[in-house]
Amino acid sequence: MAQLWGGRFTKETDQIVYDFNASIRFDKRMYAQDIAGSIAHVTMLAKQGILTESERDQIIDGLQGILRDVESGSLAITEEYEDIHSFVEANLISRIGDAGKKLHTGRSRNDQVALDMKLYTRDQIDQLDSLLYQLLSVLHRLMKEHMDTVMPGFTHLQKAQPVTLAHHLGAYFAMFVRDRGRLLDIRRRLNECPLGAGALAGTTYPLDREYTAGLLGFDRATANSMDSVSDRDYLIELLSALSVIMMHLSRMSEEIIIWNSNEYRFVELDDAYSTGSSIMPQKKNPDIAELVRGKTGRVYGALMSLLTAMKGLPLAYNKDMQEDKEQAFDAMDTVRGCIALFIGMLDTATFHRDVMENSAKGGFTNATDAADYLVMKGVPFRDAHGIIGALVLRCIEKNVSLDDLPLEEYRQVSPVFQKDIYQAISMEACVNRRLTKGAPGRKAMEDAIRENERYLTEQPPARSEKKQ
Ligand code: ARG
C-alpha cells in the first residue's frame, strides 16, 4: 500500500478497504494527462516564484522520465499505489528526492483528478470527432455512387415510396453531422481549466490559473473553485452524446441486418466483416452490426449510472465521483470501436442495385405518384386516392404491379387514364420528380451532395491545440 496521506492515521488501512477505495486499476490510463497537468503546474509555480527554476527543471525532467518509462514499458503502473496521482508523485520522489515533494504545492487531488479527466475527455472527443469524420467520408462516397440506385423507402417497415440509396444514406449523413456538432459543443463548454481550485476553496499561494490554463490548451480557468472540483456535467453531456451516436449506429445496424438477410439481399457484407456458424455451414452472419446494436445498451447504462451517482451529492468533492471513470471509459472505448468497425463494414459492403430496384417496383411504391398523375389531370386528390386504392386492390387480386396492369383496366376505373400513365409511374420518374430540397430526385440529391462536400471540406476534424 502506497498512500499519500498516512500522517494523521495510527493504523494501516484494512486491505479490503484499501482495495475498495483504490482507483489505480482504472485511472492508470490517465498517466499522460496526469503528467502533462503536473508539468504545467510546476511551470506556473516557478513563474510565480513559488518554486525555483532548478526545482522546476528537476521535477519536469523526472516527470518526463516517468512518462518515457511508462510508454516504453520499463515502468509498470502497479496496484501498490492508490491512484495514478500517487503513482506519479511517489515515483517522482523516488527518482529526484526532495524537489519531488514540492510538486503538490498549491494543488489537491480533487482539482488534479478534475483536470486529468477533462484532459482525457477532451482527447477522446477529438478522436471520436475524427472517427465520425471518416464515417461521413465513407457515406459521402457511397452517396455519390448511388444517386441512381432506386430502392423502396419504408414507413412502418412497409414499402412506401421509391427513394434512392444515396437519399437513404443521406439521412445517416445528417445524423452523424449532428453528432459531430454535439461533440464540438461539449468540447467548447468543457474547455476551462479546474487546476488551482485546490481541494475546494482555492489556495493561499499566488497561483496564475489563467497561465496554467493556457499551457494546457484551455480557453480559460474555471470560474468557481467548488464547482471546478465537483463538476462532471461535461462527462454526462458526453455520455449523452455517445448514447445518441450509439442510437444512430444501432438503427443503421438494424437496417443492415435486415438488408443483409436472405429475404432482402439489398446488401452483402464483406467476408472480413461477417462471421460463420459452428453448425450451419451455409451461414454468413452480420455479427458486427448485431454487436453494435447490442452494445448500445451499455453506453446508455453509463449515462444513467453517472446521472444517478451525481444526483444527491452535496458540494464539493465526494468520493462517489470516482465512479465517473470505469463506465465512462468503457463507453468511450465502446463507441470508438463501434464507429471504427462501421467505417470498415460500410466501406467493404456491396449494395445490390438490381435487387433494390426490383424491390421498389413491387409493393406499389408508385401508388402516390399514380394518384398525383390523376391530380395533374384535374381529379381532386381525395378522389384520386380512392381510384388508385381500387386499382391497387385489382392488382393484388391479379398479382401484378401497377406498371403491368393493362390500360383498359385503368380506364374501367377512370377514363382519365391515358398511355402516359406508365411513364408517369416509372421508378425513375417517381424519384426524379421529387425535387424539393432534401428529396431523392437527382437534381435535389446533387445539391445535397455538393452541400455535404462543402461540409467535409470546411469542417475537418478538430485536433486538440496542445497534444498531451
Ligand atoms: N481517485 C480519486 C477520484 O477518482 C481522486 C481524487 C481523490 N481525492 C480525494 N479527496 N480522495 O476521484
Image (tube, rainbow, N blue to C red):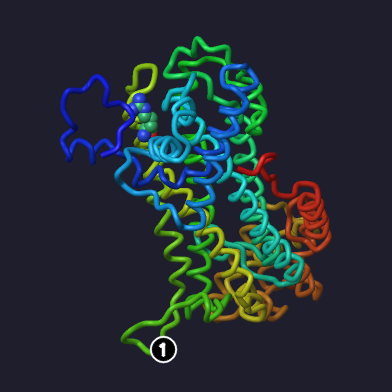
Judged left or right of residue 125, residue 69 is: left
Which residue is disc 1 drawn over? Answer: 282
Judged left or right of residue 239, residue 135 is: right
Residue 280 screen position, x and y as percent: 35, 87
- Asked if residue 398 is positioned above or below residue 36 in the image, the reply reads below
Residue 206 screen position, x and y as percent: 57, 12
- Asked if residue 309 is positioned above or below residue 382 in the image, the reply reads above
- Asked if residue 356 is positioned above or below residue 380 in the image, the reply reads below
- Asked if residue 272 is positioned above or below residue 83 in the image, the reply reads below
Tell me if I can see residue 286 in this picture: yes
Quarter, ligand 1: top left
Q: In the image, what residue type sits under mark 1? A: Gln
- In this view of the protein, which residue sits in the foreground, 169 or 324? 324
- Residue at 64 percent of width and 57 percent of height: 385
Report the residue that reaches farthest toward the top: 204
Quadrant holding the C terminus: top right
- Residue at 70 percent of width and 64 percent of height: 166
Quadrant holding the N terminus: top left
- Residue at 64 percent of width and 63 percent of height: 161
- In this view of the protein, which residue sits in the foreground, 387 or 154? 154
Q: Secondary structure at mark 1?
A: loop
